[in-house]
Amino acid sequence: MTTARVLLVDDDRSHLLTTKELLEDEGYQVTVQLGPFGATERIMTTRPDLVLLDVNMPALSGEALLPLLKARQQTRDVPVVLHSSNDEDALRRSASRLGAAGYACKGDVRGLLRVMEQVLAARPAPAPAAAPGAGDHPAASPRPLIVTPSAQARRLGGGGPWTTRPARAADTAAPHSLHATAAVSAGRLPHRVGVHFRTGGHLP
């Protein structure tokens, strides 16, 4: 059984309800959209794992709607399966030409379920959530970079150049150090990096 979210887009109310019942019996969470208009907004609000899109909708066909979904950042990565009573060869060509994730002929229930399972299984795994840092100085690598004014920087009032090295425990007492707010694994600062002066001293 699966708990994937599926959006059905079709202009045939009877087919919508029949397919919805079929997929819910298989464990899918199903939302329906009657007709193509409003499908984009429905995708953005329901965030489905897969869209089952009818091809033959007179007002706006699935073949015309799919490129619109691909062109929009909020919907382009949602896999779309074309679902139609068209000839299978024609449906295969449409899916390949439009960049659909798959296709299934109406009436072929077993084929529909197989295609949906394959498309859902091919989705990239979500990125793991980052572990929270331990206080203000997380111990995770890479280590924070310590930026210290060079002699020339002190003469110029702190405008650079800087010398850099990885942080050490003793740096908590260094009055003239600048602590980079970004953890940098390379041996130099990035182009934009926020820094702040530590208190307890002043530049000569």
Image (tube, helix red, strand yellow):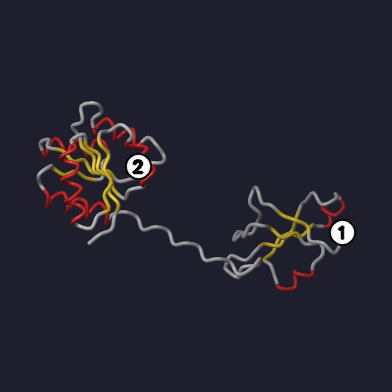
Residue 104 placement, left or right of 150 = left
The quadrant the N terminus occupies is bottom left
Q: Secondary structure at mark 1?
A: loop
Residue 30 in the image: state x and y as whole percent: 26, 49
Which residue does the image show at 13% across and 42% down from the upper left?
105
**Distance of mark 2 from mark 1, alpha carbons?**
56 Å
Q: Secondary structure at mark 2?
A: helix
Closer to the camera, 177 or 15?
15
Residue 172 placement, left or right of 67 = right
Residue 181 in the image: state x and y as whole percent: 67, 57
Residue 163 in the image: state x and y as whole percent: 74, 59
Residue 99 placement, left or right of 89 = right
Q: Amino acid at mark 1?
A: His
Which residue does the image show at 10% across and 36% down from the upper left?
87
User: Residue 138 occupies which quadrant of the picture?
Assistant: bottom right
Q: Amino acid at mark 2?
A: Ile
**Lower sequence index among marks 2 and 1:** 2
User: Residue 81 occupies which quadrant of the picture?
Assistant: top left
Which residue is label 2 attached to?
43
Counting other residues with Cα less than 10 Å from the Cα at mark 2, is it few (<14), some (14-19), or many (20 or more)? many
Pick out the residue farthest to the bottom. Answer: 169
Counting other residues with Cα less than 10 Å from the Cα at mark 1, is it few (<14), some (14-19), or many (20 or more)? few
| Rendered position, 22 above or below 70 | below
| 2 vs 1, front mark | 2
Which residue is label 1 attached to?
202
Using the image, tell me which numbered label, if any, was put on residue 92. Answer: none
Residue 162 in the image: state x and y as whole percent: 75, 55
Which residue does the image show at 86% across and 62% down from the upper left?
201
Which residue does the image show at 12% across and 52% down from the upper left?
110
Pick out the residue farthest to the top. Answer: 59
